[in-house]
Image: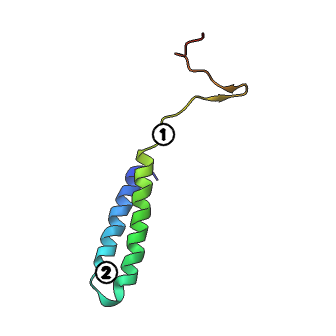
Amino acid sequence: MDGRAHYRKAEQFADKAAEYLGHGDGQETASVWAAVAQVHATLAVAAGVEPEPGPKLTRQGLEPYPDADPL
């Protein structure tokens, strides 16, 4: 799943949780759906905030940056 798919799932599960709000016996069910929605929302954010790739690891160690000043 990519970030967009997680976001869509989060919206679907949040809507499902909202269906159970205000119903006497549905509060626990609403809490479960809301928790699942929160997990997917967190995964959507995490997928969108991936760190930039760092230097590649080679057999000799880290690959030097091409724009590094070789003093």
Q: Quadrant of residue 11?
A: bottom left
- Residue 9 position in % (x across, y down): 38, 62
User: Is residue 18 placed above or below 64 in the rendered structure?
Assistant: below
Label 1 neighbourhood size at 10 Å, few (<14), some (14-19), many (20+)? few
Q: How many marks?
A: 2
Q: CA distance from mark 1 to mark 2?
A: 37 Å
Name the image colouring: rainbow
Label 2 neighbourhood size at 10 Å, few (<14), some (14-19), many (20+)? some
Q: Regarding mark 2 in the picture, which secondary structure is present there?
A: helix
Q: Regarding mark 1 in the picture, which secondary structure is present there?
A: loop
| Residue at x 41%, y 53% (from the top left corner) | 44
Identified by mark 2, the residue type is Tyr
Residue assigned mark 2:
20
Question: Which of 55 and 37 lies nearest the eye of the viewer?
Answer: 55
Residue assigned mark 1:
51
| Residue at x 36%, y 68% (from the top left corner) | 13
User: Is residue 37 placed above or below 70 in the rendered structure?
Assistant: below
Residue most toward the left? 22
- Residue 50 position in % (x across, y down): 46, 43
Left/right of residue 63 with respect to residue 46 in the rendered view:
right
| Residue at x 30%, y 70% (from the top left corner) | 15
Identified by mark 1, the residue type is Pro
Left/right of residue 63 with respect to residue 18 in the rendered view:
right
